[in-house]
Each structure stands twice: as structure tokens, then as C-alpha cells.
Image (cartoon, rainbow, N blue to C red):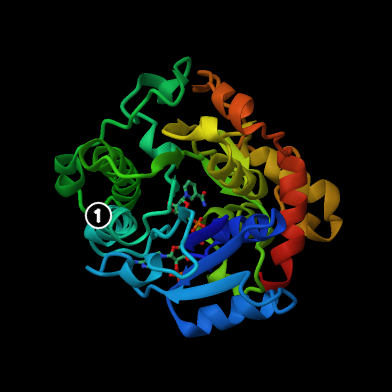
């Protein structure tokens, strides 16, 4: 297939790009600048002409962002949309909402208008679009699946504009909802599939320019290596996660498998906690012993109240992913970015 992949310089997208190329697909990758395209090109200089091309999309929320990228010769068969801000240096909720919502809808419009051969569109959404943060005891005992939606409203976001976490989660919820509404209203020639991963950890693909260029979800592991949690392990977020390589394969399988069309996928490997991350680093990288909390340090375990439940059977049955363990993931992550910490 000939696939348009947005945000190709990103952490997750870089793995999707590698997987697409490994599986024999040709890719048109969007990045924000010629400089970013040149860096990626360097990593794939061995590829024959035409297997990897680029389109510059400096800002996904600008009005004609994707018009040129969608109109390709030879034409596109599929689209994977990952580009959306995932960092917490925002000043206003709009900094999340606009690129997420406008970016998604402008892309879907551009495909409908300019890429009539496209049959499959895969959107990287998030477990943020599934979880209900209002559940008692952090959702302990409730089993989340693809049928669940985060009930966050725009009013809640605007009432507390400095709450960047809420604005981010809302951006993922509203953009995914907007995409399904587009499908309903516009009845385009393509099918939509949305991917809803929780925390994504794993090695980085492209050489990093410095620790500030490390993606947001790997900051936790980085902060263990920096000695930030020597006395106390921080409490764990939602306790569920997925390895970036399994998520990338999930995107590619979702695009290739007919049965995955018109579905949401809650793609998680299962439970983890921050103590397991510290244990994995201590076991495999003894040189970091002094930077890490000891085995007896407090914090970071599973809560006594119990955990939220998850049902990932649809992902396992249709996408047929065999998930990596948290230990493997952390060992490979540390190897990939320890030199720039
Ligand atoms: P990254 O920050 O590494 O990647 C985000 C990509 O989007 C980058 O290529 C970035 O470009 C691009 N981008 C952001 N804003 C814009 C914009 N306004 N216009 C054009 N491009 C833009 O994050 P991840 O790879 O971790 O995240 C990718 C997707 O996965 C996001 O949609 C995120 O919400 C979702 N996700 C991530 C999870 C995680 O734990 N990592 C968990 C669940 C979902 P540049 O770097 O040049 O700014």
C-alpha cells in the first residue's frame, strides 16, 4: 500500500514508519520542516527511490494543511494520523485542542476531496478518550473497553484552563469523537479505525539531539536514570501501558486487516507500576545503582484499593499482537537513550 503517515518525526510515528517500510509499504511522511525530513531521510538512505517521500505540514491546524499531502501521484491507499501535540508546555487549552480537532477534521476532508483511492484511515487516539476520571477509587473494579468514552466536557476544560492534563485528555477525546462524527455525516469512501493506547514506553528510533528532545512518555524512565526518585518512587499513573513497537505493529495491522475497519482499539499490554521500572533498570544496568531508589524505598507499587480493569480481547483477537513485557521494554528504552540523559 501507499501510506500517508503524519507526524513522522514523533516517537510513536517513527516506529510506525519503520514497521510500514519493513512490511513492504511505501510511505509519504509528513514532518514540520525540511530539516526534519532530511534527518529521517538519512536514516533510510539505503531505500530505493520512491519508497519514502515527504510532505511538509508545518501546522496540522492550518486551513489547507493536508491538501497537498493528500494529492499524490501515484495515489494514496491509506492514511495513519499520529500528529498531535503531546507535551505539557502549553499556555492555553487551545494549544492542544486546535491541532487535535482541526488537524483531524482537515485531514479527513483533504482525503475525501483529494485522495479518492484511500480506503483506510487509522487515527492515533488514546486511552485518554476512554477513561472516566470521575469514577470512584480511580476506577478500581471497573472494566474499561472500546465501548467507553471519557465524559469530559469543553466547559470543564475552560473552567480550569491551567489544567494541561485535562486539556490534553480532552483533545484526544474530542478529536476522536469528531472523527467518528465526520464518518457518520460525510459517509466518505474510506473506513476509520482509532487506536487508544494508554502510556506508551519504549526505545526511540532516531538519534536524539539532547535530553529535551526525548518524548514525553519516556520522561519517567529518564527521571529514574537522573536520580530524581532516589528517596521515593512516584505513584503510578493509570497502571496500564503498551510498548511502542507493539503499538506500531497494531497500527499497521489495523490498516491491513479488513475486520479492523470501523473499530476502536483499546491496545494495552496490561498492568505495570513505577517500582517495576526501577527494578528493571537496577537489574540490567548496575552502573545506575547510585541513581536509583533502593529495593526498600517507599512508593510506586500497586494500590490497596485495587486497579481499574481492562478488556483488550478485541485487540488480541483481531490485531493478533503478542505484547512485550515491561522489563524488556525498559531494558531496550534505557539502551536507546541513556547516552543523552
Ligand atoms: P511526539 O511528541 O513524539 O510526536 C508528536 C508528533 O506530532 C511530532 O512529530 C510533532 O512534530 C507532531 N505535531 C505536534 N503538533 C503538531 C502541529 N501543530 N502540526 C504538525 N505536527 C505536529 O509524541 P508521541 O509520539 O508520544 O505521540 C503521538 C501520538 O500518540 C499523539 O497523538 C499522542 O496524543 C498519542 N498518544 C501518545 C501516548 C504516549 O504515551 N506517548 C499515549 C497515548 C496516545 P514536532 O516534534 O516536529 O513538533
Q: Quadrant of residue 156?
A: top left
Choose between 191 and 238: the one closer to the eye. 191
Which residue is rendered at x = 30% and y = 57% of the image? 96
Q: Give left or right: position of 210 versus 83.
A: right
Residue 291 visible in rendering: no
Residue closest to the eye, 303 or 17: 17
Q: Residue 41: percent from the left, percent from the top?
A: 62, 78
Q: Is residue 330 above or below residue 141?
A: below
Q: Which residue is mark 1?
A: 162
Residue 198 visible in rendering: yes
Instruction: Please tell me whether mark 1 sits on a helix, a strand or a loop.
Output: loop
**Which sits in the foreground, 228 or 91?**
91
x, y percent for residue 77? 49, 54
Where, quadrant-wise, is the N terminus in this rendering?
bottom right
Quadrant holding the C terminus = bottom right
Q: Residue at x 27, y 40 (%)?
A: 187
- Given residues 155 and 236, the one toward you in this image is 155
Residue 27 in the image, given as x and y percentages of width and height: 56, 64
The answer to whether residue 179 is left or right of residue 158 is right
Amino acid at each position: 500500500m501507499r501510506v500517508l503517515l503524519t507526524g513522522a518525526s514523533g516517537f510513536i510515528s517513527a516506529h510506525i514508519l519503520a514497521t510500514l517500510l519493513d512490511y513492504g509499504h511505501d510511505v509519504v511522511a509528513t514532518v514540520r520542516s525540511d530539516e526534519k525530513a532530511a534527518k529521517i531521510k538519512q536514516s533510510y538512505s539505503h531505500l530505493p527511490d520512491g519508497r519514502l517521500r515527504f510532505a511538509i505540514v508545518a501546522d496540522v491546524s492550518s486551513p489547507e494543511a493536508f491538501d497537498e499531502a493528500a494529492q499524490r501521484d501515484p495515489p494514496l491507499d491509506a492514511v495513519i494520523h499520529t500528529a498531535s501535540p503531546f507535551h505539557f508546555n502549553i499556555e492555553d487549552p487551545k494549544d492542544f485542542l486546535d491541532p487535535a480537532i482541526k488537524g483531524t477534521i482537515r485531514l479527513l476532508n483533504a482525503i475525501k476531496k483529494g485522495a479518492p483511492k484511500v480506503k483506510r484511515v487509522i487515527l492515533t487516539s488514546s486511552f485518554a478518550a476512554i477513561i472516566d476520571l470521575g469514577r470512584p477509587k480511580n476506577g478500581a473494579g471497573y472494566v474499561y473497553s472500546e465501548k467507553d468514552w471519557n465524559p469530559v466536557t469543553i466547559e470543564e476544560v475552560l473552567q480550569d484552563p491551567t489544567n494541561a492534563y485535562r486539556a490534553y485528555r480532552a483533545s484526544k477525546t474530542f478529536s476522536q469523537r469528531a472523527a467518528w462524527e465526520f464518518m457518520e455525516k460525510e459517509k466518505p469512501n474510506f473506513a476509520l479505525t482509532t487506536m487508544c493506547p494508554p502510556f506508551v514506553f519504549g526505545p526511540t528510533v532516531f538519534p536524539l539531539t539532547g535530553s529535551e528532545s526525548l518524548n514525553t512518555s519516556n520522561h519517567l524512565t529518564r527521571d529514574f536514570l537522573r536520580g530524581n526518585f532516589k528517596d521515593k518512587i512516584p505513584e503510578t499513573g493509570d497502571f496500564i501501558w503498551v510498548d511502542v513497537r507493539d503499538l506500531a505493529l497494531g497500527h499497521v495491522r489495523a490498516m491491513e486487516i479488513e475486520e479492523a475497519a470501523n473499530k476502536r482499539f483499546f491496545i494495552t499490554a496490561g498492568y505495570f507500576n513505577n517500582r517495576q521500572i526501577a527494578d528493571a533498570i537496577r537489574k540490567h544496568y548496575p552502573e545506575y545503582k547510585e541513581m536509583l531508589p533502593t529495593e526498600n524505598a517507599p512508593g510506586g507499587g500497586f494500590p490497596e484499593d485495587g486497579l481499574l480493569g481492562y478488556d483488550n480481547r478485541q485487540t488480541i483477537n483481531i490485531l493478533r499482537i503478542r505484547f512485550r513485557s515491561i522489563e524488556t521494554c525498559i531494558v531496550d528504552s534505557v539502551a536507546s537513550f541513556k547516552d543523552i540523559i
